[in-house]
Amino acid sequence: MTTPQPEGSAQKSIAEQVFEAQRILRLLNFDDERCNERSALTFLALMGMTPDVAWVDAERPLLRTVEIMDWLRTRYDKDYKPNSRETIRRFTLHQFIDGGLVVLNPDDPKRPVNSPKNCYQIEKEAFDLIQRTGDADFEDQVAAYLARVPGLRAKYAMERDLLRIPVTLPDGTEVRLSPGGQNELIVPIIKDFCERFTPGGKILYIGDADEKWSIFQERALADLGVTIDSHGKMPDVIVHLPDRNWLVLIEAASSHGPVDSKRHGELKNLFQAATAGLVFISCFPSRADLRQYLKDIAWETDVWCADNPTHLIHFNGERFLGPYDHS
């Protein structure tokens, strides 16, 4: 008896190819979430596959998340909604990277992890292995590859660590921030701004796009009445000045923009329970960078430029560098 086939050869080919991709991902020890249809299709896109291409003829394109979605729409008739981009990134690509299957930004390892230009590529050894899908000894080759994976992962982790930016905090603690983005500005903020304008201050928080919270003194913030919601958009640096009981909230405006009226309101709401006075600082790499944002800076905040580190620019209010009580 002949088993009925799905209508359309391409449709059958897509179903078969997705099944094969899921089988390969399982052999590579990925869990159920990374072997579902979304992950299998993402894997196919990163292998440069189309429904009529054999694994041996796969390619290895460098793709951004939006390009992966375009690939699936045009080659596999799978139209993911725009809001699926974050799901693909967080629940498939991140784990593919952690598992050594995919490399992030091989064209520019210093690219910030939150850059819209972030791109992904199948790791070369994994690609060479997967092209041999169908070989009689393929599963033996997979076993040999998996034995090498810990070493590969360690190698890439070491390479990433070498790119990280070392910075020493006022108390002598050294932290290493991921390269690029606002972290390039956080270094002079800590070295120059904090030394001059928050002497004796304790850094309670440094955000890092790669690690989310590079420094996070949760207990110290809680003692000041601040409970952090992980979904709240934190400033880039928080400094507590115990002698004045100020919390200095610093935005590295190179990536996210300054403390404008909207951000000013967000930060006041996020820190509304704080027992310390709030001071708002926008930091820029240079006065030239500041120029395009001048019209947006919120009143009752201050601005610091790394190329003029000994000066602050004060935006009105009754005092220079201090909190305001509007209660």
Image (cartoon, rainbow, N blue to C red):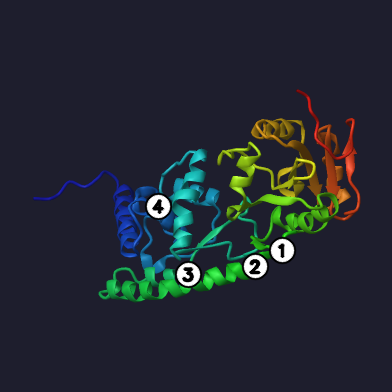
At label 4, which amino acid type do we have? Ser
Q: Which residue is mark 3?
A: 153
Task: Please determine whether, in this image, residue 262 is positioned above or below residue 38.
Answer: above
Question: Which of the labelled discs sits on residue 163, or is there none?
Answer: 2
- Quadrant of the snapshot with the C terminus: top right
At label 2, which amino acid type do we have? Leu
Position of residue 247 measured from the top left corner of the image (x, y, whole percent): 73, 41
Q: Which residue is mark 4?
A: 39
**Between 73 and 257, the one nearer to me in the picture:** 257
The answer to whether marks 1 and 3 mark residues whose Cβ atoms lie closer than 8 Å is: no
Q: CA distance from mark 4 to mark 3?
A: 20 Å
Mark in the foreground, 1 or 2: 1
Q: Could you tell me which residue is drawn at 48 percent across and 51 percent down?
A: 71
Mark in the foreground, 1 or 4: 1
Disc 2: CA contacts within 10 A as few (<14), some (14-19) or many (>=20): some
Tag 3 secondary structure: helix
The answer to whether marks 4 and 2 mark residues whose Cβ atoms lie closer than 8 Å is: no
Q: CA distance from mark 4 to mark 2?
A: 29 Å
Position of residue 220 measured from the top left corner of the image (x, y, whole percent): 63, 46
Tag 1 secondary structure: loop
For marks 4 and 2, the one nearer the N-term is 4
Position of residue 53 measured from the top left corner of the image (x, y, whole percent): 38, 61
Q: Could you tell me which residue is drawn at 43 percent across and 63 percent down?
A: 99
Q: CA distance from mark 1 to mark 3?
A: 31 Å
Q: Could you tell me which residue is drawn at 77 percent across and 35 percent down?
A: 260
Q: CA distance from mark 3 to mark 2?
A: 16 Å
